[in-house]
Amino acid sequence: MTMSLHWRNWGGNQHSVAAEVLTPGTVDEVAALVKEASATGHKVKAVGSGHSFTAIAVADDRRLLLHRLSELVAVDGDLVTVQAGMPLHRLNRLLAEHGLAMPNLGDIDQQTVAGAISTGTHGSGQAHSTLASCVEAVTLVTGTGEVQRIDASSPLFPAARLGIGALGVLVEVTLRCVPAFVLLADERPMALSEVLASLDEGIATNDHLEFYWYPYTDRAQLKRNNKVSVSDRPLSAFRGWLDDELLANTVFQAACRLGRAVPATVPGISAVAARALTARTYTDRSDRVFCTPRRVRFTEMEYEIPRECLGEALGALPRIIEKLPFKVQFPVEVRFTGPDDIWLSHGYGRDSAYIAVHQFSGSPYEPYFRAFEAVCEPLGGRPHWGKMHYRDAESLRRAYPKFDDFVAVRDQLDPARTFTNAYLDRVLG
């Protein structure tokens, strides 16, 4: 199969033309390709499924695809080792076949395992952090072509679990999983004020909690997921199609296109959408509750902030949106996680609130995103590595206590910067 030199990400806001596309089928082939590139001064950039909105996967020299490295390596109790090019939706099916599951997931399952952990993909829940917190070991090919396995016994481990593509090419990942479980999903429209008033209690008493706020309204949708012993309230096929396919994708896409063509309609559409939501409660396998089909394409910025700063950041959004020279068509998503000790994890050392702002693909977004970033940065905010942001190494060093430790590991594993690109130059220096 011939791979195109041209590449565009899922959101459509990043693209590149590579000089060469590399498609290794073994770890040894990855090592040989990296070693040759390093010796000749070329750059290599591993690219996953293109679900990052930043330029983290942009490759202008040699683009390396890992779709041929996507198999199960081993299952040892709750430790599962897979090749790093495996997509999450396949991982979820494989785990279910072995009576296992990821303890938490984001709402999209199209990313590769390598891409998801390397950018800080996360779900929601006080007892959870990024997916990288489930990583027990990685095997990577360093900038000199050496194959290294790094686990908790190595001083490199806190960097290698979430490496933003700067330390090497991930080829295998060992994940600590949990026994397969069922979730009871409870989704209901509420007044935003009501959601915020009960937020602390809701985070503490639910396994997973998140909510969406609809711009130009005072309405929100609250989503709570909790473990239960049996799946005794399955969603009917018709209701699943109605909510997740017709309304969330087909109708929403048509509304976004109308709003982009006729901006004056957006506040009214948002108000109707917020009022048209109906409550639903159902049970299903955990990954089927966490992950939903997303066919309406968008561009996104997501900021992690200390949880105690949520009110200030969220309160600024209506004022920002009111002043924009265009309309905001997407709801604002808010999620919560607990602390971890991974050096470049957004949740390093603190309880986190995540606020994600989106715009329909092809619609303007930069003034919106820059204004929101200007609110979050002084709060100690950390931008999601795979979502749009405008930060550089100097400002990120202030946000991450272990920033210089990470750069030192980069110096050790990729001294010639074989894996760099313009994005990494900007965010790491």
Image (cartoon, rainbow, N blue to C red):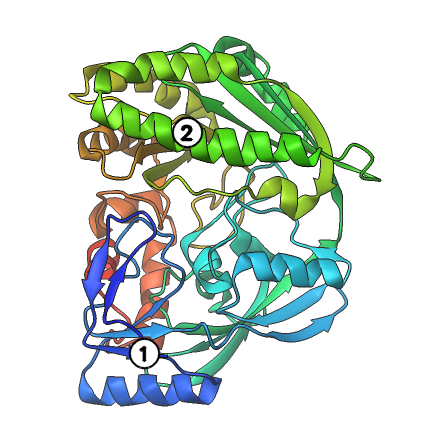
Q: Nearer the viewer, residue 181 or 340?
A: 181
Element marked by disc 2: helix
Mark yes or no: residue 360 visible: yes
Q: Which residue is mark 1?
A: 2
Q: Nearer the viewer, residue 300 or 382?
A: 300
Give the quarter of the image for residue 237.
Answer: top right
In the rendered image, residue 250, in percent from the top left (x then y), is placed at: 44, 34
Sequence-wise, the earlier of marks 2 and 1 is 1
Task: Left or right? Give the position of 298 relative to 350.
Answer: left
Q: Nearer the viewer, residue 107 or 209?
A: 107
Mark yes or no: residue 216 visible: no
Q: Residue at x 75, y 35 (%)?
A: 234
Task: Left or right? Give the position of 1 relative to 104.
Answer: left
Sort mark 1 into few (<14), some (14-19) or many (20+) by Cα contacts within 10 Å. Answer: few
- Amino acid at dot 2: Phe
- Mark identifier at residue 145: none
Q: Residue at x 53, y 67 (%)?
A: 86
The quarter of the picture where the C terminus appears is bottom left
In the rendered image, residue 243, in percent from the top left (x then y), is placed at: 57, 30
In the rendered image, residue 75, in percent from the top left (x then y), is placed at: 71, 71
The quarter of the picture where the N terminus appears is bottom left
Q: Residue at x 59, y 35 (%)?
A: 241
Element marked by disc 1: loop
Q: Nearer the viewer, residue 49 or 357?
A: 49
In the rendered image, residue 23, in percent from the top left (x then y), is placed at: 37, 80
Q: Residue at x 27, y 49 (%)?
A: 12
Q: Mark 1 and mark 2 in contact (Cβ < 8 Å)?
A: no
Q: Which residue is mark 2?
A: 252
- Amino acid at dot 1: Thr
